[in-house]
Image (cartoon, rainbow, N blue to C red):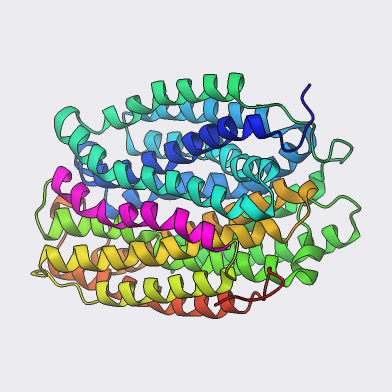
Amino acid sequence: MNTQRNPESNKGAVLAVTCAASFLFPFMGSSVNVALPSIGVDLDMSAVQLAWVATSFLLTSAILLVPVGRVGDMKGRKDLLVVGVATYVVGSTLAALAGTGTTLIASRAVQGAGGAMLAATSIAIVSDFFGPGERGRALGINAAALYGGLSLGPAIGGIVTEAFGWRALFFMNIPLGIALILAAWYKLPRLRPASPDMKFDFKGLAAYAVFLLGLMYGATELPESRGFILMAIGLGALVILILIERRSDMPLVDIVLFKTNVVFAMSNIAALLNYSATFATSFLLSLYLQVVSGLSPGRAGLVLVSMPLVQAIVSPLAGRLSDRIEPRILASTGMGLSALSLLLMSRLAANTPISYVVAALLLFGLGVGLFSSPNTNAVMTSVPPPKYGLASATLATMRQIGMVLSMALATLIIGSFVGEITVGSTPIGQFVSAVRLTFLVCTVACVAGIVASFARGRIHSSETA
């Protein structure tokens, strides 16, 4: 068994496999966003129900991220990554064959379980092989692959949906996933587990699952009374979780790390606020461009590609800069640009020129690109190697919670304006008003994220402007 920590000869293979993994999952998500109106017509689903096509994936992965990250620390990350991709392939197959909206939503939950295993391991694997002086660059390249998936997803998704139908999007992921499984199995070095003697915290897992499920599922059910009840149960479980983990010698969630490590804590809070503010953008604009502006799925995809394309270009540069310039400067600047772009999108109207949308998306891509890899670099540099899996999974959980809250916000506002009307019958005026209000609330959340981002403190010995 290869137990070396940083063999130079393996770095290229590690980066290639983890980049391929980081590409696949956002590619699926962004391509499906463009197909949502077609899915809604084919399966007779409302805009609120369509939001669950994304939310079921996010909710499942968010609950599993920290537990499987801990399993990766205990048992090894390579096997967990392979199992994750295999689970994702199974979910893609089930989604491609789905005959009802409920079946499709359940299939996306299976994909989410696979996605949790991937997200909890890929960044940790990169951090294992690349030290502090080069980690930002490697994470930037990895982020570029992620945004490359986001970039190609809308364009290819729109073309495939028009030519072959939305089911082809899920079928397309099956051979890609199988190729990734083979590449990971044969090319990814097998390292000694970081914490092989650690025992799994099942009590913490139970409280953690109830906390996230209650909070996140409850948020999607607002303003119904069951939504408030579920969120109250979730918050009660959080109190129990804190009490359990403070007494545990091997906690699932390291509460002390949040309390004593300011960089780790504030970087994770910044990620939570960033994704809460930004994730629903693709969902909202996909519906806006097709339902309001009347674009085809292919043309809508080409418009949406402008945002992640800029992210893919900016992320490697931002990651490399974060090895020398404080991440809080780069990430806070990125959050500011994102807030400005969201404010611009809150002014959308039924007759807004497509050029205005593209300009706002380009600015948005620049902002998110400046934020993502420096923030990730700050999180991973703030912890020792035995906690890479936990840190990676915690950051990914913050992203997933933010994504679910973002979709919950969009679902709540759209539902209050247009109700359960199917996509083909959506009233334009009410829908545009819902989109504008959602983007305005997201702008406020993004501004709050700037404060958290800048308050994280420094990771370098001297700050360079």
| Total residue callouts | 0
* Residue 219, horizontal then vertical, whole percent: 50, 63
* Residue 344 in sight: yes
Left or right: 325 in relation to 419: right
* Residue 82, horizontal then vertical, whole percent: 59, 26
Left or right: 349 in relation to 272: left
- Quadrant of the image for the C terminus? bottom right
Q: Residue at x 83, y 40 (%)?
A: 195
* Residue 183, horizontal then vertical, whole percent: 53, 22
* Residue 370, horizontal then vertical, whole percent: 45, 64
- Residue 291 shown in magenta: no
Residue 242 to residue 93: above or below: below
Residue 42 to residue 140: above or below: above
* Residue 421 in sight: no
- Quadrant of the image for the N terminus? top right
Q: Tell me where residue 264 sits by quadrant.
A: bottom right
Q: Nearer the viewer, residue 282 or 37?
A: 282
Left or right: 246 in relation to 235: right
Residue range of the region highlighted in magenta in the rendering: 297-322
Q: Tell me where residue 282 sits by quadrant.
A: bottom left
Q: Residue at x 10, y 67 (%)?
A: 353
Q: Nearer the viewer, residue 44 or 140?
A: 140
Main SS type for the magenta part? helix
- Residue 304 shown in magenta: yes
Residue 301 to residue 242: above or below: above
